Amino acid sequence: MKELRIGMLGFGTVARGVAGLLHRNQTQIEERCGVTLKLIRIATRTPDKAKGMAGLDAVRVDTDCESLTQDANLDCVVELIGGFDPAEKLVTMALNHGKHVVTANKALIAERGMALFNTAQKNHRDFAFEAAVAGAVPIVKAIRESLAANRIESVHGILNGTCNYILTEMRERKLSFAETLAQAQEKGYAEADPSFDIDGIDAAHKLAILAAIAWGTPPDFRGIHIEGIRQITDSDITWASEMGYRIKLLAIAKRHDAGLELRVQPTLVATGTMVSQVEGVFNAVFVKSDHAGTTMYHGRGAGEYPTASAVVADLIDLARNQQAGIAGTRVSPLSVLPHNLRPLPVHGLIHLQCEYYLRLAILDRPGVLAEITAILAKHGISIDAIHQKGGATAQEAVSLVIMTHQCKEKDLQTSLGVLEHLESVQGKPVVIRIETGLS
Amino acid sequence: MKELRIGMLGFGTVARGVAGLLHRNQTQIEERCGVTLKLIRIATRTPDKAKGMAGLDAVRVDTDCESLTQDANLDCVVELIGGFDPAEKLVTMALNHGKHVVTANKALIAERGMALFNTAQKNHRDFAFEAAVAGAVPIVKAIRESLAANRIESVHGILNGTCNYILTEMRERKLSFAETLAQAQEKGYAEADPSFDIDGIDAAHKLAILAAIAWGTPPDFRGIHIEGIRQITDSDITWASEMGYRIKLLAIAKRHDAGLELRVQPTLVATGTMVSQVEGVFNAVFVKSDHAGTTMYHGRGAGEYPTASAVVADLIDLARNQQAGIAGTRVSPLSVLPHNLRPLPVHGLIHLQCEYYLRLAILDRPGVLAEITAILAKHGISIDAIHQKGGATAQEAVSLVIMTHQCKEKDLQTSLGVLEHLESVQGKPVVIRIETGLS
């Protein structure tokens, strides 16, 4: 049996999942691709973790990452360190030393992807990253291959399981953001430093990758408008529920004639839509295209086993390519050939038109409502519904929740600029956009 | 630019969709694969339909299917005739004359697939059929490639849009099966002869294909237990709703140690599960596997454009393969290499254990209920809930609906055999299985 000889950088959760999967399902994988996927070597800061693990008896485990990238015994390197340093340097070295590379590193692809694609191309190596987006959900291949006949109109989805878990728990248990985050950390659904997840960075990395594949552009992380979920309160969730909505952290990419709309934001989605039903740690991606219509992909977006499933799917593709003698020559890592990749201008948030959920902390004094509604009216913002939570004293701020009809982001921002400076408005208003027309 | 020269057999709805797509998105497809997908020739019984259609000026259109399969100017043949005769003969001829073949013909793959796979293999030709299952939903590639690292535990889904549309409309509009079918036929969602769809044959063809890919077996259409939806009444749907269920025509395949459970049946699924939310003409497939967990794929399962999207995705794969010089050599049409395909025994319906929905037409006489429940009890079938629709005279049959606790299919069948012969039971009891544990 032919072999694909694999070296692995890093030995965290996903890496252990990959090692375990390759061991457990070796026979089946051989039947499917006619190649043995053989883990030869692991380089990690914590080699002790590999001790005694099933299937690793014959695997060399040490701390020497650089030497691994140059090891003549390896066909490919699986990078599971994460982050930029030293992952970027090591991936580049591996490609330059003739190794194919499989990675789950979303930050690396989203922010430094183009340089790596070029390095892979120059060295005629495969460079694959299905596991970087939505874990077990095969969305990279779906857009790149299965929808390749289509013009993609939009891609939107729930790409961060931590945020979705927190928002789901807040709704179901009526807990505060802080309490829910603490619980998520206890359960291992949120990191000790959760900011990458809850501030929307992780979802934005994934969105940058999906948009690049959907429209044949270099990944444009910097073009994404990013908001996280820290400012969402359990009251927001309750009010949204009462008005027929759930709050989800949505990653949204849309093709306009003028360019790409790219944003990660807490969003109100109507209860009963499929996207509103995506709960807990699950991810889902909806792709709207000119012929296929809307197709949807749903599954576990993170975790040892689901992510390992995606990493090994890439390894199996690579093994098949290598066996056919075409590794590094066939499909670009993105959907279009490299010389056809071209950047698209960003179609900024300011061009958005939608309905809005606004929450203002106001002092409950005579005339305040009249003042606020007059300012909104002056800027052409029409109110669909308004709720004021009573019961506080005149000294205490109360919450005023406003749902607008469709209006322009520009007009909304202008009016918010005025509202923020009113004496009766405390702090910064919370703005959540409402996404209509979803399936 | 290199070319993939395409001949098309048939010019019905999907074929017109393919021709239109290739014309409209030609530039984008060239950017993605570096190959022009060029429609050269069409053979159809109705060549007049192609007259004046955009993009067909230079395409030869005639009725000579056999000559098309032998045309030295063609690299591949797209078969969109459907059925066995003459599709099977023409596909075989095309493969034997060195053409790659792409088809949307589910019956052909499900019932005659193995012979065709062997012919393709012998001739070193690609043979692709993503469009045969679930239209635009890329479930063939997802199981074959994206989940290739996994042991698949089960595949279940809604694979027939006609049935799902009828069941959805019956529930929402409280109409009878006959009325809803007539409306579906008017709208073009059901054929003039709808039996292939409503009797479950079409869904079973698709299930045979998915099971073959999931477990590396030859397609086993004959091993599938098939029931359609003709016997479902609007009352069944209403009762199911009241008890927290929807009725869906589910295609279910499960791997047991003893073999494969394969069945297409109307099924009660809990309201609130994702599968219960798949409505109207949409299809969805859920795949449960050892590492990826449950992944789900949802979209339009039929129609001109969605099916064309899948056909052209296969053509783009083929173009990429041909450009790399590996067409016909790379991936088997199924997930495992041909010499590793092996049949699995059928794990028959009789081994099932589940909860059941039973509807009996009974004469409302003293002692009838006692008689029926005694028979069920004698066979170890425990009743969870029982409803009798009153209001009829003693001469008229009334509906008795029983929900059982989990019990054995064998015991149920034995007791039904007894119940059917009671004087107070009219006609054949309706049995709908309840599928629990779904996401």
Image (cartoon, coloured by chain):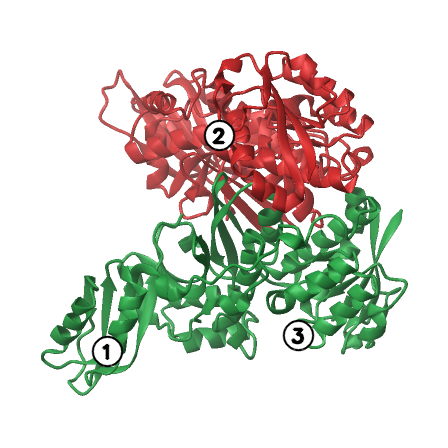
Chain colours: A green, B red
Q: Is residue B253 above or below residue B10?
A: below
Name the residue type under label 3: Phe
Q: Is residue A8 above or below residue B136?
A: below
Give coordinates of residue B2: x percent, y percent. Answer: 70, 37
Q: Residue at x 68, y 59 (%)?
A: A308
Report the Cα–Cα distance between label 1 and label 3.
41 Å
Q: In this rendering, does residue A108 appear at all?
A: no
Q: Chain of mark 1?
A: A
Q: Are marks 1 and 3 in contact (CB under 8 Å)?
A: no
- The mark lying in front, picked from 1 and 2, is 1
Report the disc number at residue A84. 3
Q: Are marks 2 and 3 on the same chain?
A: no
Q: Earlier in the sequence, mark 1 or mark 3?
A: 3
Quadrant of residue B6 within the rendered picture: top right
Report the disc number at residue B304. 2
Q: Chain of mark 3?
A: A
Q: Are marks 1 and 2 in contact (CB under 8 Å)?
A: no
Name the residue type under label 1: Val
Mark 3 residue element: loop
Q: How many numbered marks have been drawn onto this rendered protein structure? A: 3
Q: Chain of mark 2?
A: B
Residue that mark 1 sits on: A418
Q: Residue at x 80, y 47 (%)?
A: A326
Quadrant of residue B188 within the rendered picture: top left
Give coordinates of residue A359: x percent, y percent. Answer: 27, 72
Q: In this rendering, does residue B118 appear at all?
A: yes
**Does residue A365 appear left or right of residue B106 in this picture?**
left
